[in-house]
Amino acid sequence: PKCESCAVFMLDMPSPGNGTWVDDEEECFYKCNPGFITSEETCNACPSDADAYNGEWTPDTCAWTCAPSYFNYTLSATPDCVPCSERARRLGVPRPNNSEWIDGLAECVYGPAIGFRC
């Protein structure tokens, strides 16, 4: 017999859909794609859409975390991830005069407005 990767070996086998066969493991198994969860040997879509909330799926769950440069302002398991300036606005976080919140960074920070120095 020919030795093949799991993905190749299982090509003719029925699959639950919305996932892939996993290679380089002791046994062949099927893993659901991000945004899908295993239920009764099928991959079912999660009830929410992480992309709509600027999130990234946590593997093998229907939970997500905020994508880089987005911040959870709801502090829930299904966060609403927003840019720094929007999070600060919604939470009413003050900043020094002549400064602005900087979006697109890994941390939510403020910097000087144009023409000013902090």
Image: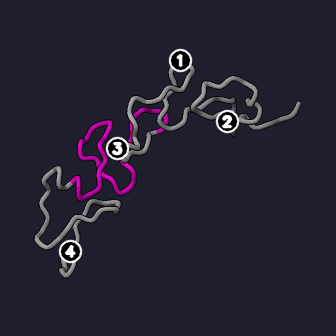
* Tag 1 secondary structure: loop
Q: Earlier in the sequence, mark 4 or mark 2?
A: 2
Q: Earlier in the sequence, mark 3 or mark 2?
A: 2
Would residue 63 be found to the left or right of residue 28 on screen? left
The secondary structure making up most of the magenta span is loop
In percent of the image, x 33 and y 53: which residue is there? Answer: 70
Quadrant position of residue 11: top right
Give the alpha-carbon distance from disc 1 to disc 3, as whole Å: 28 Å
Residue bearing mark 3: 53
Amino acid type for the residue under numbered disc 1: Glu
Q: Nearer the viewer, mark 1 or mark 2?
A: 1
Give the numbered dot on residue 40.
Answer: 1
Amino acid at pointer 3: Tyr
The secondary element bearing badge 3 is classed as helix
Q: Residue at x 53, y 17 (%)?
A: 40
For the N terminus, the quadrant is top right
Which amino acid type is marked by label 2?
A: Glu
Instruction: Check if residue 80 falls in the magenta segment.
Output: yes
Discs 1/3, front: 3
Q: Earlier in the sequence, mark 4 or mark 1?
A: 1
Q: Residue furthest front?
A: 52
**Badge nearest the viewer, 4 or 3:** 3
Q: CA distance from mark 1 to mark 2?
A: 22 Å
Q: Which mark is residue 112?
A: 4
Residue topped by disc 2: 25
Q: Where, quadrant-wise, is the C terminus in this rendering?
A: bottom left
Q: Which residues are magenta?
A: 59-87
Q: Residue at x 65, y 36 (%)?
A: 22
Judge whether residue 82 is colored magenta: yes
